[in-house]
Image (spheres, grey):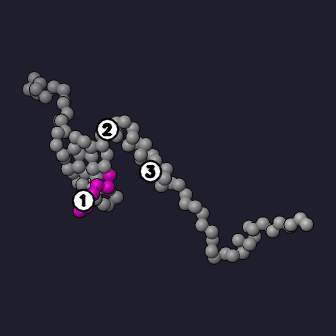
Amino acid sequence: MRRFAQWSRPHVATVLDKELKRQVTVDGSDYTMAVDPEGLRLTGKGKRTPEVELRWRDLLSGEAAMAVALNASLAKKPKAAARPESDPSAEETSKRPPKKLAR
C-alpha cells in the first residue's frame, strides 16, 4: 500500500517569476487581472489603463490599507448642504430679525 508515497512530500508553492493573466467578472463587468512579481493590476476588459494597481510592498507595509481607508472615508463624506430654491418661505423664517441700532 505504499503506491502513493511519492505524493506525501510537502507541497511547495510555484515561484511567481512572470506575469499571469486571468479574466474575472465583478458585478457583471469583465476585468483582466494580471499578477506579477511586483504586484497585481485589475483592468477593465478592452481598456489599457488599470483601474486598480496594488504593489506587494504597499500591501505588506500597510500603505495600501491606509489608501483604501482614506478613499472610503472621502467617499462617505457628505457634500455641503445646498439651499432649497423651491421654498422661499423657509429662508425668511430662518433669518434673524434685524438688530436695532442704539442712538
Magenta span of residues: 45-52
User: Which circle marks residue 57 in the picture?
Assistant: 2
Outermost residue to the front: 103
Give the mark nearer the N terminus: 1 vs 2: 1
Quarter holding the N terminus is top left
In the picture, residue 95 is in which quadrant?
bottom right
Q: Residues within 10 Å of mark 3 (few under 14, many from 20)?
A: few
Residue 5 vs 89, above or below: the answer is: above
Tell me whether the residue at label 3 lies in contact with that at label 1, contact meaning CB atoms closer than 8 angstroms: no
Name the residue at the right extreme: 103
Q: Is residue 1 something one can see in this rendering? A: no
Residue tagged by mark 1? 48
Q: Amino acid at mark 3?
A: Asn
Quadrant holding the C terminus = bottom right
Q: CA distance from mark 1 to mark 2?
A: 24 Å
**In contact (CB < 8 Å): disc 3 and disc 2:** no
Residue 57, percent across and down? 31, 38
Distance CA(mark 3)–CA(mark 2): 19 Å
Residue under the image location 25 percent in, 51 percent down:
33
Q: Image height check: is 68 above or below 75?
A: above
Q: Amino acid at mark 2?
A: Arg
Position of 21 with respect to 84 (left or right) is left
The amino acid marked with disc number 1 is Arg
Residue 83 marker? none
Q: Mark 3 or mark 2, which has the lower sequence index?
A: 2
Q: Compared to 20, does 102 lie above or below?
A: below
Residue indicated by mark 3? 71
Return the disc, 3 or 1, that comes first in the chain's sequence: 1
- Label 2: element kind: helix
